[in-house]
Image (cartoon, rainbow, N blue to C red):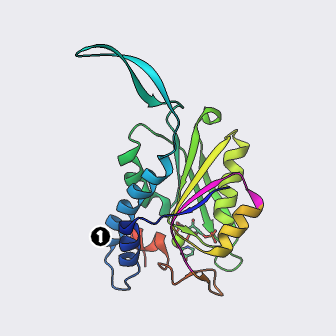
Amino acid sequence: MAIFESTHPLVKHKVSLLRDIDISVKAFRELTKEVAVLLTVEATQHFELTQVPLTCWSGDIQVPMVAKPQPTLVPILRAGLGMLDGALTILPCAKISVVGLRRDEKTLDPETYYENIINDIESRTAIIIDPMLATGGTAISTIDLLKKSGCKHIVALFLVAAPEGIQALVDVHPDVDLIIGTIDERLNENGYILPGLGDAGDKIFGTL
Ligand SMILES: O=P(O)(O)OC[C@H]1O[C@H](OP(=O)(O)OP(=O)(O)O)[C@H](O)[C@@H]1O
Ligand SMILES: O=c1cc[nH]c(=O)[nH]1
Ligand SMILES: [Mg+2]
């Protein structure tokens, strides 16, 4: 597994703005989208290229094009939807697989309530998008679902991650690459990330 924490100054700046207790729903949505754009650039920067023939204005040439089929984006409902527009800005032709999971507030175990994964996932990279990696339970279950569907290459993007969640993911799915905006300090006793963003889903959907 590769664990990559972004060093981009704009990622750091925007994640810092997301932490403001007085942030509006509008600003939280906009910043989430903007960080998703930047993280998607980071996630795609090592995509393999291949030379293909093309006829251009001056004749026949060989041009570099991405070798593998378009990836599938995998937003985890609900909060992952807040990153979808940003990821699609960079990957406008990506297929979309949707999974819905929620944490039980007491046990912190994830419950899967929706699954719609594309058919031909074997040949595509899956890019999971979710603002938060806390205990890691939700991401681990999502990766289980993707692998059961035949997915062979998985990258996961998070705005903020806790060290506990990263370790849990490494232990269970060591082959998955992580792209993280900022690695925070720790989880609190309720499984929330410190200093964190609070409940990202509630802030994106205005359900606080
Ligand atoms: O790493 P974990 O401990 O599993 O926690 C992380 C998950 O918790 C949040 O979703 P939540 O369950 O609040 O659902 P929501 O997106 O509908 O708010 C978050 O968006 C992740 O999906
Ligand atoms: O800190 C956290 C942990 C889980 N889910 C969130 O939205 N925030
Ligand atoms: Mg939530």
Residue most toward the top? 59
Residue most toward the left? 57
Whether the magenta-drawn stretch holds residue 79 is answered as: no
Residue plotted at (32% across, 65% down): 30
Q: Quadrant of the C terminus?
A: bottom left
The quarter of the displayed image where residue 192 is located: bottom right
Residue plotted at (37% across, 68% down): 9
Residue wearing tag 1? 26
Q: Does 204 appear above or below 43?
A: below
Q: Quadrant of the N terminus?
A: bottom right
**Quadrant location of ligand 1?**
bottom right
Residue plotted at (71% across, 51% down): 175
Where is residue 64 drawn, in percent x and y? 42, 28
Q: Image check: 1 left or right of 14?
A: right
Where is residue 141 drawn, in percent x and y? 69, 58
Q: Does 167 appear above or below 185?
A: above
Whether the magenta-drawn stretch holds residue 176 is answered as: yes
Disc 1 residue type?
Lys
Q: Does 111 appear above or below 64?
A: below
Highlighted range, magenta: 172-184
The quarter of the displayed image where residue 147 is located: top right
Q: Secondary structure at mark 1?
A: helix
Depth check: give the residue in front, 9 or 182.
9
Q: How many marks?
A: 1
Q: Does 158 appear above or below 155?
A: below
Residue plotted at (54% across, 68% down): 132
